Image (cartoon, rainbow, N blue to C red):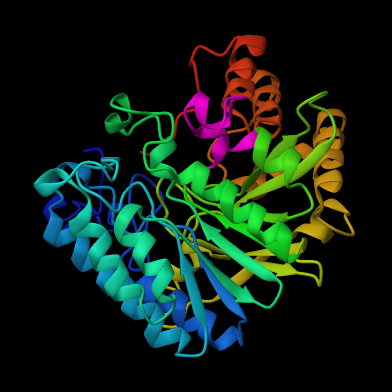
Amino acid sequence: MPLCCRNHSGRASWKHTGAGYWGTYGDCDLPLRTVENLLQNVAKSGPWDWVYWTGDIPAHNVWSQTWAQQLNELVTITRLLHKHLGPNVTVYPAVGNHESTPVNSFPPPFVHGNRSSRWLYDTMAEEWAPWLPKEALETIRRGGFYTCEVERGLRVVSLNMNFCARENYWLMVNSTDPAGQLQWLINILQESENKGEKVHIIGHIPPGLCLSNWTSSLVPSYNPISFSRYESTITGQFFGHTHVDEFQMFYDEDTLTRPLSVAFIAPSVTTYVNLNPGRIYFLTCSNRMVLDHETFILNLTLANNQPSKPDPNPSWTLLYRASKAYGLSTLFPSDMDALIKVMKNDDRVFQRFWYLFHKGHVSKPCTDTCKTSLICLLHSGRYDLLTQCDVLHGDKHSVRKTMC
């Protein structure tokens, strides 16, 4: 089966091969109780200023999903966030590729009627209304993206990255800027620059995994205009989707060597595939750039066997703090670019990254072509650079596989 640990999977023949109470390594998603336990622990670890939620709520049983099921899971998780974080913590969500059904299917706003995404966006607007202003809810209903002021001097832009996704077949109709989102983004960035605001961009699919025209030199486009023109305005990017703990770099258009920005890609809460459940906190400094981040995990081996039965109160433990793990004082673009160079030459640092990349549960080593390709991918906030990684290093796959 493409996804195990479901109700219809049946009972295991032997106890030790069955799914664990808190989750299981392999092709499995998490039970809801583990998600709620995570949120209980997050709440106790606060207080929090605000939360970025980078999308993907439903499980990976994509062949059997319905509108009703997707909406139920959206409502369930949203209300659990309200319940555990309380009314004083604002959550800024982004739309993941699994929120819709069929998976990855996000028609542009000019598609109306039963084929549109109105069924999804309307429910998002209703459920997220306690967190977001009226103007943000209007653009969510239209295309699943929005902007709002987080605090004085800082604005968040939540992009619907499904309008750049290679797996969204609706983009065969129009892949340039089908929702007018990129032009809208440029307008927001210009307004923020005029006001002296800093901007954090959040989304689900990292830009380096988008269609080539999303990060090309065409206008409007995400990469050249956003980061060369608004380098001093965009101070943070936060994405998800890949399920692992990584980042992607953005460089200047002229030389492709001067680091302009970093897209931090947070690891998943789900175990899919063969991972520890994880969570991540970003700590930002006064100029709204990332100073450091921490990743916490739930060690399933310990949580499921304490000593012969599941631990009723499993411990989410600190896996690492980036500054300590890599010997960095900040996580600015120049720091992360320097880290990549260190990993190229010092295999001990790279293997540490590989271990943390998998949230402390590595299923296979990474050497030779694997190492060279991964380091290349970290450089690749643009799709055209991503494809060069494969060409240069003889990868049989044309592009990196995504968690679709």
221 w.r.t. 144: above or below: above
Answer whether residue 234 is visible to the viewer in this image.
yes
Q: Give the x, y percent position of residue 261.
A: 74, 45
Residue at 38% of width from left, 51% of height from top? 96
The answer to whether residue 91 is left or right of residue 393 is left
The one nearer the camera, 387 or 11, is 387
Residue 267, quarter of picture: bottom right
The one nearer the camera, 159 or 2, is 159
The answer to whether residue 2 is left or right of residue 392 is left
Decide whether residue 214 is among the magenta residues.
yes
Residue 334, quarter of picture: top right
Q: Quadrant of the C terminus?
A: top left
Q: Give the x, y percent position of residue 32.
A: 30, 70
The one nearer the camera, 83 or 276, is 83
Residue 294, quarter of picture: bottom right
Q: Give the x, y percent position of residue 349.
A: 81, 41
Q: Quadrant of the N terminus?
A: top left
Answer whether residue 242 is visible to the viewer in this image.
no
The answer to whether residue 125 is left or right of residue 325 is left
Q: Which residues are magenta?
A: 206-223
The one nearer the camera, 276 or 13, is 276
85 w.r.t. 261: above or below: below
Number of marks drawn: 0
The answer to whether residue 269 is left or right of residue 187 is left
Residue at 26% of width from left, 44% of height from top? 3
Q: Give the x, y percent position of residue 319.
A: 66, 62
Decide whether residue 371 is among the magenta residues.
no
